[in-house]
């Protein structure tokens, strides 16, 4: 074997690794971050990607709903009757930003914050609701984002632990270690 | 004690139930509360109330910063802050705990006022400029007023929550305390139960010894009663055994018949013997009809009769009847059966007791036979009496004829006349022989038993027998050696043998074989002869004559000893042959047995008693009287028959004696008184008058002790001769008396008298 072949193989290998790294990063940015046209409603920070821990993502309503919405029909302690909430699964949001941690700390506009374990998003279809009964929510309606658990479907969720995690006027998510 | 224990137990159980129930109630209530608390959005009233203050103060802060040109605060930020504060207020009043918040003192008025104020401020905020301090101060002073009110409400909320928490804590404390009490009660109960158990265990330990003693006592009692029971069982077993043996050893055959099936269900050993069938065979579906002939002796059909009897038994009667059974060998067995219904309600059972009547019937038959024999004997006796009587009178007549003939013989020398006289004498003698035969039959013959040898007797007769018996008949004799001698009348024995030989000859008109044999026979009670005859046990000599003739028909057998009965025809036979033999043998203390089989032959056996050697008078006395010279004597004769009296008188007078004749005992006695003394008395035994021959002899001997006596009689009567004080030397003559015999007897008597009287005469 000649030396040139060996060197060229090594060079190709290194190039491939660099290309893959850059490519994957570009793809991630392209796939998760739609160009933000409307006002930013959600900022995601923390351990989002192994390669760029300090990076953060921001979403407007359209970008968020672009991840795919789902409906939850449920009663809540704060509303009257069965309400249809429409929003994006927390699981999908975390996947979209390639979240690496075991929990997220959610913070509201009024500085209220609570830690939501990742298991909740794995076990239940927890959504970050954008709409209540089809309409976008205002700040006065506890909007624009509200974390909703499927209480009516899962009786084990109907307690203070999950009511406390049901944060409204959600502003940001920080993926924790 | 038991009552107390029971009460305690009930109390404990109740207590336990109460404890469990209370625990359950507490648990469920606390669980329920937990669930309620968890299920409800409890929220923190204080937090919510305080949050309103905070948001109001945030607005104030943001307005101040906005007015002081803080670039991070924009008009949108101010509006958002207002919205947040508004949402907090609206949240506090509209959510599920909103009423709780509104219930706080002043809260309701505050909320209303605050919302109105916020709504009123909103346009002011939108229009607020960065340097418009006056407007800002006006807005913030409004907001500060709200903050003061909100703070008051928040204080109320804190007080409410504190009070609520205290109530909660009190409830929890109470619950905890009651749980503790329950635990204590439970522990107490457990301790009490333990104590109770320990006491019971101790008591039971204490009682166990006593119990053991009681158990021991009971065990021994049980053993005793077991022993008793066993004894009872044994006794019952034995009783059953006894009953079983009662049935098994019953003399009756006992059978139990199932009347519905018609078969036997039980049988005892006697029944097995009766039918000749084993019990298993009898019980294997055997019916009474199978064991009976088709018809009963009375002509009834067996099956019909049997059914009728069984029905009577089932109706409650106890029929007793004679029945003919047929055993397995085909032999008919006469039986007497009694039937009785068995007390079994389930089945129709009939018990039959069966008595085998075979032996009884046989006994009846032999009884009938005995009766027949008795009748025969009585008949013979009667005929004998009659014959004896006739012979007696006949003898007297013959005596007269013979005596007169002998006297006539002395009176003539004429040969022709003498021949006639001799013929008449012979006829008289034959007549005498005939009457002698008759008297033999009547057992009244004047026998002279002496010791003789039958062998010699038969041997002596062989000579003349050969002349009497035709050559077609072969005569064989068989004499056993060392034959005992017998005691018998010689002429009687000869006559008997002759009769038998002649009968045997007549039984074989076409020839045959005649056997004459003698044999010693010991008769004891077991021997055949003892049962067939009247012989007493002892030694006998048998003389048998056997022929191979036609035999004697069974219907003739019973009459064979009857006098004048003959099968031979009147001309040839007197019919007295066997009658005479029978009479002779009976008189000689022996007997006759006749065995006859038609077509084969007849054997006649004579049994003579053997001579007893101890007292034998061996030889005949020498007859020397005829040679002795006898002096003339005075003789007294008593005889009621005048003819006989005359013959005697003439015969004696011809001898030179002086004879005094009398016709009765009484007359003789008186003549003896008048004319005595006499040298000799000749007297008939039976005479008219008070004094008979023996009485006369005794009477006269009271005067003359040595008076010799000669008795005359028509027949021998031992009752008269014996036991009447007569003497041995007294002579006895049988009528008709031949002259020589009479003279010889007179001479003998006179010689004896002389020898007795010689001292007196000299």
Image (cartoon, helix red, strand yellow):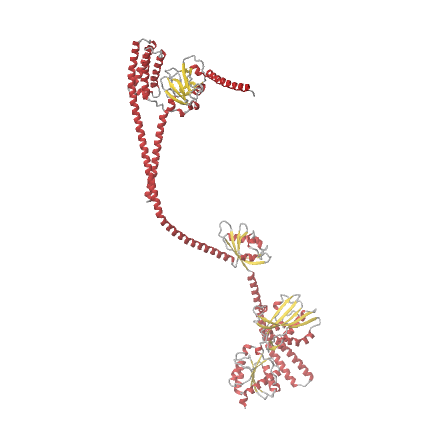
The residue sitting at the bottom extreme is B762
Viewer-proximal residue among B95 and A52? A52
Q: Is residue B452 left or right of residue B95?
A: right
Percent x, y of residue B6: 34, 42
Q: Quadrant of the N terminus of chain B?
A: top left
Q: Quadrant of residue A94?
A: top left
Residue A144 seen from this side = yes
Percent x, y of residue B610: 59, 74
Viewer-proximal residue among B664 and B500? B500
The residue sitting at the front extreme is A3
**How many numbered discs sit on the rendered protein?**
0
Q: Is residue B668 above or below residue A85?
A: below
Percent x, y of residue B168: 31, 27
Viewer-proximal residue among B485 and A73? A73
**Which residue is found at the position 32% from the left and 38% from the top?**
B188
The residue sitting at the right extreme is B471
Residue B106 seen from this side = no
Viewer-proximal residue among B420 and B350? B350
Q: Is residue B531 left or right of residue A156?
A: right
Q: Quadrant of the C terminus of chain B?
A: bottom right
Percent x, y of residue B472: 71, 70
């Amino acid at each position: 074997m000649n030396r040139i072949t060996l060197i060229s193989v090594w060079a190709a290998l290194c190039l491939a690794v660099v290309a893959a790294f850059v490519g994957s990063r570009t793809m991630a940015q392209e796939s998760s971050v739609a160009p933000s046209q409307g006002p930013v409603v959600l900022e995601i920070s923390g351990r989002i990607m192994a390669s760029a821990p300090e990076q953060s993502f921001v979403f407007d309503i359209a970008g968020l709903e672009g991840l795919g919405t789902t409906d939850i029909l449920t009663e809540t302690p704060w509303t009257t009757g069965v309400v249809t909430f429409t929003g994006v699964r927390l699981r999908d949001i975390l996947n979209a930003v390639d979240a690496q941690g075991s929990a997220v700390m959610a913070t509201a506009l009024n500085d209220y914050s609570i830690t939501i374990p990742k298991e909740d998003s794995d076990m239940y279809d927890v959504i970050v609701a954008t709409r209540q009964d089809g309409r976008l929510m205002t700040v006065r309606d506890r909007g624009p984002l509200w974390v909703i658990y499927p209480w009516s479907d899962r009786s084990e969720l109907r307690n203070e632990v999950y009511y406390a995690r049901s944060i409204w006027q959600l502003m940001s998510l920080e993926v924790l270690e | 004690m038991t009552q107390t224990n029971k009460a305690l137990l009930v109390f404990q159980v109740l207590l336990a139930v109460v404890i469990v129930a209370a625990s359950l109630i507490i648990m469920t209530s606390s669980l329920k509360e937990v669930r309620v608390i968890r299920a409800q959005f409890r929220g923190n009233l204080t937090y919510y109330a305080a949050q309103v203050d905070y948001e109001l103060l945030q607005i104030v802060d943001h307005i101040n910063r906005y007015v002081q040109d803080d670039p991070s605060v924009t008009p949108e930020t101010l509006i958002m802050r207002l919205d947040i504060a508004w949402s907090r207020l609206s949240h506090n009043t509209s959510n599920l705990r909103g009423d709780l918040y509104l219930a706080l003192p002043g809260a309701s008025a505050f909320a209303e006022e605050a919302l109105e104020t916020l709504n009123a401020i909103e346009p002011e905020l939108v229009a607020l400029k960065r340097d418009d301090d006056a407007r800002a101060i006006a807005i913030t002073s409004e907001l500060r007023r709200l903050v003061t009110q909100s703070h008051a409400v928040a204080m109320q909320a804190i007080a409410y929550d504190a009070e609520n928490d205290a109530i909660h804590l009190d409830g929890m404390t109470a619950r905890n305390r009651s749980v503790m009490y329950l635990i204590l009660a439970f522990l107490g109960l457990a301790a009490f139960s333990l104590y109770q158990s320990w006491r019971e265990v101790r008591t039971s330990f204490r009682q166990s010894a006593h119990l053991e003693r009681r158990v021991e006592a009971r065990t021994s009692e049980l053993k005793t009663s077991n022993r008793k029971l066993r004894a009872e069982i044994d006794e019952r077993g034995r009783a059953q055994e006894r009953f079983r043996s009662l049935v098994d050893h019953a003399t009756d055959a006992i059978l139990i018949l199932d009347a519905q099936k018609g078969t036997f269900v039980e049988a005892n050993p006697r029944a097995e013997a009766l039918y000749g069938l084993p019990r298993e065979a009898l019980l294997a579906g055997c019916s009474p009809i199978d064991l009976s002939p088709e018809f009963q002796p009375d002509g009834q059909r067996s099956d019909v009769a049997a059914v009728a009897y069984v029905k009577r038994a089932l109706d409650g009667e106890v029929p007793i009847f004679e029945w003919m059974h047929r055993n397995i060998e085909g032999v008919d067995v006469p039986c007497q059966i009694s039937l009785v219904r068995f007390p079994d309600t389930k089945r129709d059972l009939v018990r039959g007791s069966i008595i085998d009547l075979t032996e009884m019937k046989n006994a009846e038959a032999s009884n009938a036979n005995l009766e027949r024999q008795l009748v025969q004997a009585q008949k013979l006796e009667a005929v004998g009496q009659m014959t004896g009587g006739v012979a007696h009178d006949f003898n007297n007549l013959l005596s007269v004829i013979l005596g007169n003939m002998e006297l006539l013989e002395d009176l003539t020398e004429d040969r022709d006349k003498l021949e006639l006289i001799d013929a008449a004498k012979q006829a008289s003698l034959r007549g005498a022989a005939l009457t002698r035969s008759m008297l033999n039959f009547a057992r009244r013959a004047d026998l002279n038993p002496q010791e003789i040898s039958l062998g010699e007797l038969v041997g002596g007769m062989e000579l003349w027998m050969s002349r009497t018996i035709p050559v077609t008949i072969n005569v064989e004799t068989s004499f056993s050696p060392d034959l005992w001698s017998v005691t018998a009348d010689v002429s009687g024995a000869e006559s008997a043998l002759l009769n038998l030989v002649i009968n045997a000859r007549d039984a074989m008109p076409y020839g045959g074989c005649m056997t004459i044999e003698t044999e010693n026979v010991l008769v004891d009670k077991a021997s055949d002869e003892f049962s067939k005859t009247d012989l007493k046990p002892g030694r006998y000599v048998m003389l048998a004559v056997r022929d191979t003739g036609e035999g004697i028909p069974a219907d003739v057998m019973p009459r064979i000893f009857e006098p004048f009965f003959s099968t031979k025809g009147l001309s040839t036979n007197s019919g007295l042959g066997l009658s005479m033999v029978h009479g002779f043998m009976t008189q000689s203390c022996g007997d006759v047995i006749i065995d006859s089989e038609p077509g084969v032959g007849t054997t006649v056996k004579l049994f003579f008693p053997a001579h007893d050697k101890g007292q034998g008078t061996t030889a005949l006395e020498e007859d020397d009287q005829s040679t002795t010279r006898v002096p003339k004597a005075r003789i007294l004769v008593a005889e009621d028959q005048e003819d006989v009296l005359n013959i005697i008188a003439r015969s004696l007078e011809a001898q030179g004696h002086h004879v005094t004749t009398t016709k009765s005992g009484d007359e003789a006695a008186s003549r003896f008184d008048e004319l005595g003394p006499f040298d000799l008395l000749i007297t008939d035994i039976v005479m008219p008058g008070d004094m008979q021959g023996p009485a006369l002899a005794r009477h006269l001997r009271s005067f003359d002790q040595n008076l010799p006596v000669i008795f005359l009689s028509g027949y021998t009567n031992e009752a008269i001769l014996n036991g009447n004080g007569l003497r041995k030397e007294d002579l006895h003559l049988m009528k008709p008396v031949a002259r020589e015999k009479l003279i010889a007897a007179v001479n003998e008597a006179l010689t004896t008298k002389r020898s007795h009287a010689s001292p007196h005469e000299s």
